[in-house]
């Protein structure tokens, strides 16, 4: 194929600016007037939905511009200038960002529409639409920004909106806990991300993508010296930046926040915690692929972190009973696939899986939301144990859920099949030494994926309905049109989104992957024996079908098997059911010690400086100011001096050690 | 040097005197008149300080709007005022803080109203004076003068343990200043002048320079406050009335950071280089130590006070990175911190006036009962944890970037403060605003006009500086570049 040449346009382009700012303006107006105007209180969705529709159309226009050979890269205004550091608020529209923008606006639009029905009657109706529009703005800034600092802005801002939306029902302690956990775990990742940006600036003197890329070759042989040993600069920079990706895309070991994030309303889980925000990590790694590719260790790190998460989540998913948590673990696992693709150098294929996954995973979430909506009078509508037989009551949800499940299981012809198979094929034929290992893990997990996806499918839609007691005899019902139409559109997406990039071996043109090539590098299988490719394909389809078959046996044919199995292997089952004990591990190794240290610090101050000497240990009240003052005169000054001296001595010791 | 506005600095500095004179003649029972006179005069003063900004020449790194008159002739001391890019932003900030203090105290101070507003006006004069004075004696005068009204504000209108706190506050800051006075006298004896501009660039034997640096640094470090001399701040904040806390957080502790940039760096460059790394280590200790201390607090004001110690650790970190990015970030962060922490103290004052409790465990579910107030508090919380789009991000980012160019390991430690900061602020927010509604907060009065008038400008500033930081950075650029030239 002939290398496509692009014309880079540096002038201001209104379309580009409007795409993120329309939802932003809508969000601010709804937030400001939601309390005072009855229109915005009762119909807060009007403005955001219109804004998003226009944004979506503008994104499509830009998509055709890019296909026509144009790239926009311009600064809107200068954001900060200090010393040699200059950064602007600017946009970059290239194949990668325009594809993300189209996907984000499209899904966000559909999920806005769905939420009109799902969130109806909630006291925070207007708040919801304001936040979710603000999220869309942040996500668009993240993908469209032309420099790393703007990426960081979008990165933190989507995290903030995620915080607001996970904690949307903030009266619930579990929801506000989950929101806080998500934010802080993400902050840990962002700590590395920020240092990574500093590192890039330190060595290249710029934060603009196009300038960074042109200066990257200078880093190739640089080592950062710490005493006797040095660290390869590209590796360290990649590692630090990847910390951010681990936080945002919920990869091991920072994956613990995502399952808890399911406390938020279901449309939020679909948009933020499946389709868009959590894929920001893959977007970032792909955007900076030339940095990651400079260090083989960085690539290995990406591949294996992805593989570990992929496997870990796939084992936990079948043990959970909360429908949204199962889907959340499935998201973790699929994100792992995308990182595996990146880690074998097939960034475009990772992005392709990101694209198809957005549709079928959003569909799975919205389908779950439709079920939850039907059962919302039950004490715990998320519990798959009260579901069953819903096929009869909710035909549209049933069909669309089936399509999503088939797609994620990799049944040929559907979107998930094409993207997952591409990843496996690229892993198998990869030039990187870990390619075959990654392929094998991916293959095994494909079986798990089919199994747990059909586990919830069979438990929800087949057999007898078990929720009559919980619903006090009421029958579940199909959701309103405003919810089912987005389901149908997404179901179409879950089938056809894969057809954009049918591999060459199946007679397709791999258009999607090749469209992205200018941004993220080629991911072509060169000199590959098509026969091997067909065998690999057949193998993964077989594994997927096996998973579905097993699920059928366990959940339809002989439903007692599950409990028999879990009691037979109780130890292992409990360990996996409790999510490999990660929450407990972090609680005892990080949370507890931190609070312990804080209490110690405070006790040190308060006890020695204030309370020391008061027999009952109570704080001074108005009655004992006199005695407090007496103590001040008689002895406490000495305590001060002792402690100031002590502090100074400790500090000089630290100082001389560091010299 | 000519400027188009004659004596503008003197006007800004002494305008509150008009209000003071009027207040003397007003009967003490006419509280409304007392409040309005103070408000209007300070408002005019604020407008004057904005005009000052408008006439500032960005490209000139030297002092502008300079006024120099003979003052105490026989010791060769001058009434010498002027501002440059480092100090100019503190002038409107000081006046703004006083303005907001008047607004926020409108209803909450019911006792000795006249004396209270007099104290505020005197504080305003002293604050502006500190940032304009270019004669070391004059500077020292303003520096110490601020202690008296602050001592009164905390000691008379403060909480139950106010006497203890004022004692501690006075003792600490006074001891620090004495060292500075000795250093000023030494320099006067040696060179026969108090003029700042004449003293810049003088050479000293290194050991003398180190001693002089330390004498100044002790005074500034206590004001900032740096670890381990920070313990006066939480006590002073906790017991101070809302206005007192706002002034403390908004301006008083900035005087320390300003002092480092204005005096320690240009007067003693060799000593600065010698001590820089030590101060960086102290800054990191402050950031982390105070962050941990925040996690264990159950007192709203105490928590925010400790967060101030942590944030000011970032400021000293930026200053002693000794590069333009770090120093500009530090100056901006001082402005930001004045806005954000001042606003947070005002917010605490809002609920304290209604419930008379500062205990975090007393609250819960405020987002349900006072949603607008919750929104304000959320904005300042986010600015405090440095979320991009708010002013807090710009300062923190530039400081850490500047510091990274200087020392990577220290920066890595300092950046953990960002994680701890998010943890304690969001935990605070969760306990006060989220979860189930605590019966204590049912039926609280919504925000009043004076409170809104004080909080809305702060929200505007948070986002304005967050999205257009060049509005502030443009002022300081050339002066900071000139300052840093000494260290290259």
Image: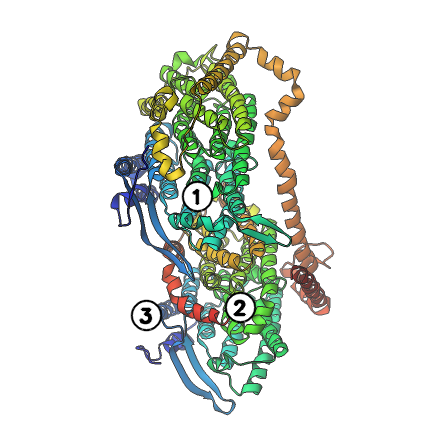
Of discs 1 and 2, which sits in the foreground?
Answer: 1
Q: Is residue A396 left or right of residue B363?
A: left
Decide which of tag 2 and tag 3 comes sooner along the chain.
Answer: 3
**Marks 1,2: beta carbons within 8 A:** no
Residue underneath mark 2:
B256
Q: Is residue B162 visible?
A: no
Regarding mark 1 in the picture, which secondary structure is present there? helix
Nearer to us in this view, B9 or A538: A538
Is residue B236 placed above or below A263 in the rendered structure? below
Of discs 3 and 1, which sits in the foreground?
Answer: 1
Q: Name the image quarter holding the N terminus of chain A.
A: top left
Which residue lies most toward the front here?
A527
User: In the rendering, which numbered label is found on residue B51?
Assistant: 3
- Residue visible at 42% across and 54% down in the picture: A206
Is residue A326 placed above or below B300 in the rendered structure? above
Q: Name the image quarter holding the C terminus of chain A.
A: bottom right
The crowding category of the residue bearing disc 2, from other C-alpha atoms within 10 Å (few below 14, some 14 to 19, many at least 20), is: many
Q: CA distance from mark 2 to mark 3?
A: 26 Å
Q: How many marks?
A: 3
Regarding mark 2 in the picture, which secondary structure is present there? helix
- Residue visible at 43% across and 62% down in the picture: A83
Horizontal and vertical percent position of residue B261: 50, 69
Horizontal and vertical percent position of residue A194: 49, 49
Q: Is residue A615 visible?
A: yes
**Marks 2,3: beta carbons within 8 A:** no
User: In the rendering, which numbered label is found on residue A155?
Assistant: 1
User: In the rendering, which numbered label is found on residue A273?
Assistant: none
Which residue lies most toward the bottom here?
B74
The crowding category of the residue bearing disc 1, from other C-alpha atoms within 10 Å (few below 14, some 14 to 19, many at least 20), is: many
Q: Is residue A14 left or right of residue A443?
A: left
């Amino acid at each position: 194929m002939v290398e496509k040449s692009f014309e880079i346009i540096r002038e201001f382009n209104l379309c580009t600016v409007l795409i993120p700012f329309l939802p932003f303006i809508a969000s601010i107006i709804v937030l400001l007037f939601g309390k005072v105007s009855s229109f915005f209180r009762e119909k807060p969705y009007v403005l955001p939905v219109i804004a998003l529709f226009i944004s979506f159309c503008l994104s499509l226009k830009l998509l055709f511009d890019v296909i026509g050979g144009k790239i926009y890269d311009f600064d809107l205004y200068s954001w900060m200038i200090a010393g040699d550091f200059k950064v602007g608020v600017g946009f970059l529209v290239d194949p990668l960002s325009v594809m993300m923008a189209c996907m984000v606006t499209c899904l966000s639009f559909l999920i806005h529409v769905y939420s009109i029905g799902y969130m109806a009657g909630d006291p925070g109706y207007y708040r919801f639409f304001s936040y979710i529009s603000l999220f869309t703005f942040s996500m668009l800034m993240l993908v469209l920004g032309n420099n790393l600092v703007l990426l960081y802005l979008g990165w933190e801002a989507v995290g903030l909106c995620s915080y607001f939306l996970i904690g949307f029902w903030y009266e619930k302690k579990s929801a506000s806990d989950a929101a806080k956990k998500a934010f802080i775990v993400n902050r840990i990742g962002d700590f590395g991300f920020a240092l990574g940006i500093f590192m890039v600036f330190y060595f290249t003197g710029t934060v603009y993508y196009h300038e960074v890329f042109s200066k990257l070759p200078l880093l190739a042989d640089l080592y950062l010296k710490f005493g006797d040993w040095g660290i390869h600069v590209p590796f360290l920079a990649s590692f630090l930046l990847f910390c951010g990706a681990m936080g945002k895309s919920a990869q091991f070991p920072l994956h613990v926040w995502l399952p808890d994030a399911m406390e938020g309303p279901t449309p939020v889980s679909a948009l933020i915690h499946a389709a868009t925000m959590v894929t920001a990590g893959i977007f970032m790694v792909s955007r900076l692929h030339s940095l990651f590719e400079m260090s083989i260790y960085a690539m290995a790190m990406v591949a294996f972190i992805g593989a570990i998460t992929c496997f870990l989540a796939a084992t936990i998913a079948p043990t959970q009973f909360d429908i949204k948590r199962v889907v959340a673990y499935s998201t973790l696992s699929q994100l792992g696939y995308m990182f595996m693709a990146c880690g074998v150098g097939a960034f475009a294929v990772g992005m392709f899986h990101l694209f198809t996954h957005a549709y079928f995973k959003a569909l799975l979430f919205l389908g779950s939301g439709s079920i939850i909506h039907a059962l919302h009078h039950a004490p715990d509508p998320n519990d798959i144990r009260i579901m069953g037989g819903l096929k009869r009551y909710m035909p549209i949800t049933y069909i669309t859920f089936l399509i999503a499940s088939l797609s994620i299981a990799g049944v040929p012809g559907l979107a998930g099949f094409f993207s997952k198979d591409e990843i496996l094929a690229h892993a198998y034929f990869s030039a990187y030494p870990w390619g075959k290992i990654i392929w094998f893990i991916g293959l095994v997990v494909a079986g798990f994926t089919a199994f747990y996806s059909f586990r919830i499918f069979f438990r929800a839609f087949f057999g007898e309905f078990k929720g009559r007691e919980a619903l006090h005899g009421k029958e579940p019902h199909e959701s309103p049109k405003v919810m089912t139409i987005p389901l149908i559109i997404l179901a179409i997406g879950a089938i056809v989104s894969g057809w954009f990039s049918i591999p060459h071996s199946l007679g397709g043109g791999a258009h999607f992957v090749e469209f992205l090539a200018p941004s993220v590098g080629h991911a072509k299988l060169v000199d590959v024996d098509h026969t091997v490719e067909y065998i690999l394909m057949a193998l993964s389809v077989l594994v997927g079908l096996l998973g579905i078959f097993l699920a059928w046996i366990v959940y339809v044919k002989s439903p007692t098997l599950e409990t028999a199995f879990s009691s037979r292997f109780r130890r292992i089952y409990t360990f996996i059911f409790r999510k490999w004990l990660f929450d407990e591990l972090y609680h005892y190794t990080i949370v507890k010690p931190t609070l312990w240290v804080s209490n110690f610090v405070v006790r040190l101050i308060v006890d020695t400086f204030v309370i020391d000497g008061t027999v009952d240990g109570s704080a001074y009240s108005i009655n004992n100011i006199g005695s407090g003052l007496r103590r001040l005169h008689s002895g406490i000054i000495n305590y001060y001096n002792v402690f100031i001296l002590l502090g100074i001595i400790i500090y000089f010791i630290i100082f001389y050690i560091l010299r | 040097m000519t400027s188009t506005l004659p004596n503008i600095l003197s006007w800004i500095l002494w305008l509150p005197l008009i209000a003071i004179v009027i207040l003397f003649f007003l009967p003490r029972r006419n509280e409304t008149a007392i409040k309005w006179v103070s408000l209007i005069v300070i408002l005019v003063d604020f407008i004057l300080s904005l005009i000052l900004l408008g006439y500032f020449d960005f490209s000139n790194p030297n002092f502008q709007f300079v006024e120099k008159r003979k003052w105490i002739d026989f010791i060769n001391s001058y009434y010498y005022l002027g501002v440059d890019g480092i100090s100019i932003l503190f002038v409107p900030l000081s006046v703004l803080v006083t303005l907001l203090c008047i607004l926020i105290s409108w209803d909450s101070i019911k006792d000795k109203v006249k004396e209270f507003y007099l104290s505020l006006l005197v504080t305003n004069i002293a604050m502006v004076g500190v940032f304009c004075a270019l004669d070391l004696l004059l500077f020292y005068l303003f520096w110490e003068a601020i202690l008296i009204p602050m001592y009164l504000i905390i000691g008379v209108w403060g909480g139950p343990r106010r006497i203890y706190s004022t004692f501690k506050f006075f003792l600490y800051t006074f001891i620090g200043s004495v060292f500075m006075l000795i250093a000023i006298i030494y320099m006067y004896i040696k060179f026969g002048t108090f003029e700042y501009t004449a003293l810049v660039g003088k050479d000293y034997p290194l050991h003398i320079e180190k001693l002089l640096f330390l004498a100044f640094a002790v005074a500034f470090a206590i004001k900032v406050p740096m670890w381990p001399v920070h313990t006066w701040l939480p006590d002073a904040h906790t017991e101070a009335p809302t206005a007192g806390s706002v002034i403390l957080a908004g301006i008083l502790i900035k005087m320390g950071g300003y002092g480092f940039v204005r005096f320690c760096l240009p007067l003693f460059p060799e000593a600065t280089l010698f001590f820089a790394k030590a101060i960086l280590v102290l800054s990191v200790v402050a950031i982390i130590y105070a962050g941990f201390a925040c996690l264990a607090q159950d007192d709203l004001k105490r928590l925010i006070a400790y967060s101030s110690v942590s944030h000011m650790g970032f400021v000293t970190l930026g200053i002693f990175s000794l590069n333009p990015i770090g120093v500009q970030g530090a100056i901006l962060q001082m402005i930001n911190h004045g806005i954000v922490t001042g606003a947070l103290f005002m917010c605490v004052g809002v609920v304290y006036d209604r419930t008379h409790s500062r205990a975090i465990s007393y609250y819960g579910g405020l987002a349900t009962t006072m949603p607008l107030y919750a929104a304000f508090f959320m904005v300042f919380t986010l600015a405090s944890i440095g979320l991009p789009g708010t002013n807090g991000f710009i300062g923190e980012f530039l400081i850490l970037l500047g510091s990274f160019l200087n020392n990577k390991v220290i920066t890595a430690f300092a950046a953990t403060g960002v994680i701890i900061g998010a943890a304690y602020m969001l935990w605070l927010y969760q306990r006060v605003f989220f979860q189930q509604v605590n019966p204590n907060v049912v039926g609280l009065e919504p925000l009043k006009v004076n409170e809104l008038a004080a909080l809305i400008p702060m929200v505007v500033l948070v986002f304005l500086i967050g999205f257009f930081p060049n509005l502030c950075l443009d002022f300081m650029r050339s002066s900071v570049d000139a300052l840093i030239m000494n260290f290259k």
